[in-house]
Image (tube, rainbow, N blue to C red):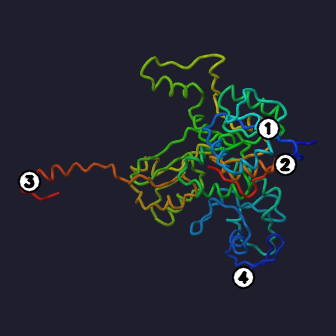
Amino acid sequence: MDPLTAPSPGGPRARVATVWLGGCSGCHMSFLDMDERLLDLAPRLDLVFSPIADAKVFPEDVLVTLVEGAVCNEEHVEMARRVRARSRLVVAFGDCAVTGNVTAIRNALGSALPVLDRAYRDAADLQPQLPYEPGIVPRLLDRVLPLHQVIAVDAFLPGCPPHADLIHAILVDVLEGRTPSLQGKLRYG
Amino acid sequence: MTVKTLTLDGTPVSAREDETILDLCREHGVALPTLCHLEGLSEVGACRLCLVEVKGSPRLHPACTLRAEEGMEITTSSERLRRYRRQILELLFAERNHVCAICVVNGRCELQEVAYAVGLDHVRYPYRHPATQLDASHTRFMLDQGRCILCTRCVRVCDEIEGAHTWDVAGRGADSRVITDLAQPWGKSDSCTSCGKCVQVCPTGALFEKIQPAGGGTKHREFLTYIKNAREKKQWIR
């Protein structure tokens, strides 16, 4: 059965994921602010990957993934592409994913190097050096990007953070087979 | 005074000859987004959001500077107009650094309101993120060029209402920016009367009041000379 139209109490549970890229996790805090509505959602979905779930590998066949944060480093690019390949719907979750927001303020410095200098060399008292651990510390991108400039995005949920009511509305839209829409409810910041 | 008759989205309306199409839209409850327009200031047609179609004319016209004429047929909403309005807003957001989450007018911003009205949920153009200047030299007000959309309301209110003409626009194209006097720091401006009208009319957070108790950090060290002279020389002069 089509997971977009199927889920209902007793039916197959929708596979939902959330991902945390370059953001402050505030969007995930707002996700938790759905409060008792989380209990209503719980029987209808499986949270198959999330910073608040114990999964190490992003799984296959996900119905919808909420992606918090802007794309700031090579690991984010890889993760975004993996999410796209394995999710039916991708939602840009919060202002950083939608616009770059605070995370992208560093773009005004031009590239990654002056940003690293500002943090690790200019301000260091002892042994000023740039972090270099290939395979462990991902390289910063020269420019922080909103999610839709890296992968195709199906729906945009702005807000810093998005209000829990809007997160709930988007999830219910998806679970009930509707195209997620924030018509008339948009809010940035 | 001659009365003009014309149609607004197919509805026959009448207008005085000094009325603009924007006046007519407001009068008849036709929603038309604007940013550079402000009741009480002259019209400049800078933001292009109020563009309308006029039957028989191949180009689009800003409603705020377009006078009503006999027999005009005006369309205020079409697929083309909606597309352009969205593009204009996307370009405004992409051009400078509009970071709503850290802006003093977040939730009370006209740029946000207009963007919500056209349903702008994301910007398709790459953000430029230019390195813009912040002028905090004035004792009471600040200018964040990153949030300026060049509507020139500040320029007009300062010239037309306050009569100081402290503000002007310098540069060309993407390098255009509002300046005080001859591009001196605002706090050094001789012509600024510190009336704050520019701050009140600014549609975004580009111009804003310092939220700290303004001037609260100023030290008045002359008190020491005054007290010493008063106590020792009995001279009670400031």
Whether discs 4 and 3 lie on one chain: the answer is yes
- Figure quadrant of residue B131: top right
Classed neighbour count for the residue bearing mark 3: other residues with Cα under 10 Å, few (<14), some (14–19), many (≥20): few
In front of the other: label 3 or label 2?
2
Q: CA distance from mark 3 to mark 2?
A: 87 Å
The quarter of the rendered structure image containing the N terminus of chain A is top right
Classed neighbour count for the residue bearing mark 1: other residues with Cα under 10 Å, few (<14), some (14–19), many (≥20): some
Circle 4 residue: B2
**In the figure, B88 relative to B195: above or below?**
above
Circle 1 residue: A152
Residue B163's spot in the image, x, y percent?
46, 64
Label 4 marks a residue whose chain is: B
In front of the other: label 4 or label 3?
3
| Mark carried by residue A168 | none
The residue type indicated by label 2 comes to Pro
- Figure quadrant of residue A138: top right
Q: Secondary structure at mark 4?
A: loop
Q: Residue at x 76, y 44 (%)?
A: A42
| Mark carried by residue B231 | 3
Is any atom of residue B112 visible in this view? yes
Q: CA distance from mark 1 to mark 2?
A: 31 Å
